[in-house]
Amino acid sequence: MNKRQAVFEQQINKVSALYLDYQNNPFSNQLVHDLRVSIRELRSLLNFIKKRLDKDHYNKLNRQLGAAARVFGPLRELDVLYDYCEAYAVDYPETSEAYYQLFNTFVKDRRIEMNRTFNKSNSTIIQQAIEDAKEISELNLFEDKKDWKKYTLKRLKKKYKKLRHAFKTVEISDYEAVHEIRKRAKKVRYVATYFDETVSKDLNQYRKDAKAIQSEFGEITDAHVNYELLTEYADKVPDENVRDLLIQIRDDIKFAE
């Protein structure tokens, strides 16, 4: 097995190990986060070599991994809301008397979503995605190290160039565009990080620049995500006091200019 195949094997093993950890302790919000990130990283690496894959094969694997990540989406959203509201409660403890009801609601809803991830259908989706992803580490998509190096540097340079152009020209008020650029930055960072040792050229500058873009746009995207999550959750909550508190927290969100 060469270095590039080893990268995929290690990443697939990482997803598999985190899924086992999650099964052992689904109450950990950190494990939920880490598991979703590991799947996202694997999808980014897979996307990077898509030009050497059969189109149908790539679409199948990418679709399966995307479905696996979505299983944990609602659970992660609740964890994000909980953390944000927890920080808000510390900063503004006198805002409402409904904090206890709010966090109790989060805990009850989280248990429901947590249990949902273990149903037969969702368990099959995740396990099948991990099993089929193992095919990637067995593929020999490049003739030799020289072929891989040429492909990697050319494709990464092209992705980075597009990222920098988008970063420089985007309107900060266009949230959807900013969000898309942040996702692109993550993909470049993951590739530069995990494939760095498979080529002779140092990819660290790509990683650092992509991480800087991701961080700069993080505040903007996080604010919008929290606003939307609070709005959607408030619409579902039957308790009027909890709903009013959620709206109060939502309306106090400051958007970056």
Image (cartoon, rainbow, N blue to C red):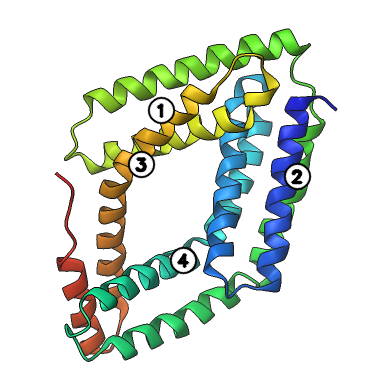
Name the residue carrying label 1: 209
Q: Please state which of residues 118 and 166 is positioned toward the viewer in this rendering.
A: 166
> What kind of residue is marked 3?
Ser
Work out how far the residue at label 3 is from the one at label 4, CA to CA, in angstroms.
Answer: 24 Å
Q: Earlier in the sequence, mark 2 or mark 1?
A: 2
Q: Earlier in the sequence, mark 1 or mark 4?
A: 4
| Local crowd size for mark 3, using a 10 Å CA cut-off: few (<14), some (14–19), many (≥20) | some
Q: Please state which of residues 189 and 108 is positioned toward the viewer in this rendering.
A: 189
Q: Earlier in the sequence, mark 4 or mark 2?
A: 4
Name the residue carrying label 4: 74
Q: Is residue 54 visible?
A: no
Q: Please state which of residues 137 and 190 is positioned toward the viewer in this rendering.
A: 190
> What kind of residue is marked 1?
Asp
Work out how far the residue at label 3 is from the one at label 1, CA to CA, in angstroms.
Answer: 10 Å
Name the residue carrying label 2: 132
Q: Which mark is residue 215?
A: 3
Of circles 3 and 4, the one toward us is: 3
Helix, strand or loop for disc 4: helix
> What kind of residue is marked 4?
Pro
Q: Are marks 3 and 4 in contact (CB under 8 Å)?
A: no
Q: Relative to 148, is 250 above or below?
A: below
Helix, strand or loop for disc 3: helix
Instruction: Indicate the position of residue 181 as horizontal and vertical percent values.
Output: 35, 34
Q: Relative to 236, is 35 above or below?
A: above
Q: Is residue 81 visible?
A: yes
Q: Earlier in the sequence, mark 3 or mark 1?
A: 1
Q: Relative to 6, is 129 above or below?
A: below
